[in-house]
């Protein structure tokens, strides 16, 4: 298949996710503004990388995209919650996200905190309401919980805000948790979705997590590099905010050339990890290359 074919496959999966997300939080209720804040951040755009990876791993391991949609949407809800909280004044204090005002700028800080909280709860509700084997649902929910908690995103965010990282090794640990944990869960949950009505291959889970491990490192290094080199208009969020805030990143610590080398190296390692078990995983190889070369 050509790059254009893979791009179309990506867009088809992204539309499938967006169509389902559009149906959420539409109830009429006294807390209507809270639901509006949840939808505002959830539907503000985004590449839907994590849910697309979930669908792709489901298909790769014998399932269908549609089987993984509840898990994939749960992942995107959890990711959106993390972005809302990441933007808060007590965290990164950002005014823009995906080219529009951040949730707390639009709705106020209190509503933004509650919108994030509610999205996190709804993420688990979606996963646990999926039409598949109960073991697959509980395993998926457990992986999502681990990715979100103190040994995942929250732990990584804590380390990031504490500024306790001034070496490459310390940065790797921050982003193995803050960025990598949810990517690993996304890929593994796709495998679990494919096993919702059939046995799960442990080797498939191992391959998915190793792919995601290297993908997450490459993704974060590319993100840090773009913060240094891209414009606010292209990024959809304030450019140069990390350096302005005195934050240590891969780009400030290692320099642009070394960052580019590491992105390429970890992208190749991600593909190698998957190719050992799935040499025909063309879409996921393309995804690794696409993320390594992205401009926002």
Image: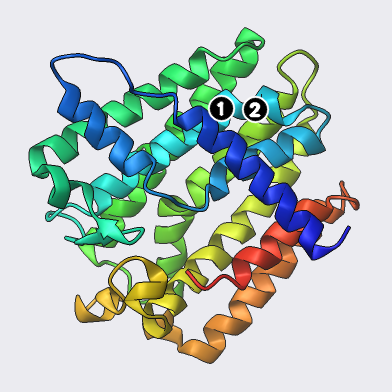
Quadrant assignment for the N terminus: bottom right
The answer to which image quadrant residue 254 occupies is bottom left
- 69 with respect to 228 (left or right): right
Q: Which of 72/195 is in front?
A: 72
Q: Which residue is mark 2?
A: 68
Residue at x 37%, y 23% (from the top left corner): 122
Name the secondary structure under disc 2: helix
Q: Position of residue 28 (x, y in %)?
A: 24, 15
Does residue 154 appear in the picture of this structure? Answer: no
Q: Is residue 220 above or below residue 279?
A: below
How packed mark 1 is, by other alpha carbons closer than 10 Å (few <14, some 14-19, many 20 or more), is: many
Q: Nearer the viewer, residue 256 or 66?
A: 66
Marks 1 & 2, CB-CB < 8 Å contact:
yes
Q: Is 51 on the left-hand or right-hand side of 31?
A: right
Tell me the distance, in whole angstroms, between the alpha carbons under discs 1 and 2.
5 Å
Residue 71: mark: 1
Q: Position of residue 194 (x, y in %)?
A: 74, 25
Looking at the image, which is closer to me, 279 or 233? 233
The answer to whether residue 120 is above or below residue 224 is: above
Residue 142: x %, y % from top left: 50, 25
Looking at the rendered structure, the secondary structure element under dot 1 is: helix
Where on the picture, by quarter, is residue 62? top right
């Amino acid at each position: 298949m050509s790059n254009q074919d893979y791009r179309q496959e990506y867009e088809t999966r992204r539309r499938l996710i967006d169509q389902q997300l559009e149906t959420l939080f539409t109830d009429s209720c006294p807390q209507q503004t809270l639901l509006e804040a949840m939808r505002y951040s959830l539907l503000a755009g985004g590449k839907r990388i994590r849910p697309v990876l979930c669908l792709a791993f489901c298909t790769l391991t014998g399932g269908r995209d549609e089987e993984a949609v509840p898990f994939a949407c749960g992942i995107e809800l959890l990711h959106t919650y993390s972005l809302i909280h990441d933007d808060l004044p007590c965290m990164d204090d950002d005014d823009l996200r995906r080219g529009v005002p951040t949730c707390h700028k639009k709705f106020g800080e209190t509503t933004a905190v509650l919108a994030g909280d509610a999205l996190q709860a709804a993420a688990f509700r979606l996963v646990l309401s999926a039409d598949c084997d109960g073991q697959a649902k509980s395993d998926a929910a457990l992986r999502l919980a681990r990715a979100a908690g103190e040994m995942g995103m929250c732990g990584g965010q804590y380390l990031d805000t504490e500024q306790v990282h001034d070496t490459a090794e310390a940065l790797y640990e921050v982003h193995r948790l803050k960025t990598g944990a949810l990517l690993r869960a996304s890929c593994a949950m796709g495998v679990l979705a494919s096993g919702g009505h059939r046995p799960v291959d442990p080797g498939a889970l191992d391959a998915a997590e190793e792919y995601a491990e290297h993908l997450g490192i490459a993704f974060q290094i590319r993100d840090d590099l773009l913060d240094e080199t891209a414009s606010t208009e292209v990024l959809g969020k304030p450019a140069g905010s990390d350096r302005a805030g005195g934050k240590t990143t891969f780009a400030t610590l290692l320099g642009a050339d070394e960052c580019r080398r590491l992105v390429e190296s970890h992208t190749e390692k991600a593909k190698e990890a998957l190719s050992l078990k799935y040499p025909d995983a063309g879409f996921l190889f393309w995804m690794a290359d696409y993320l390594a070369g992205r401009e926002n």
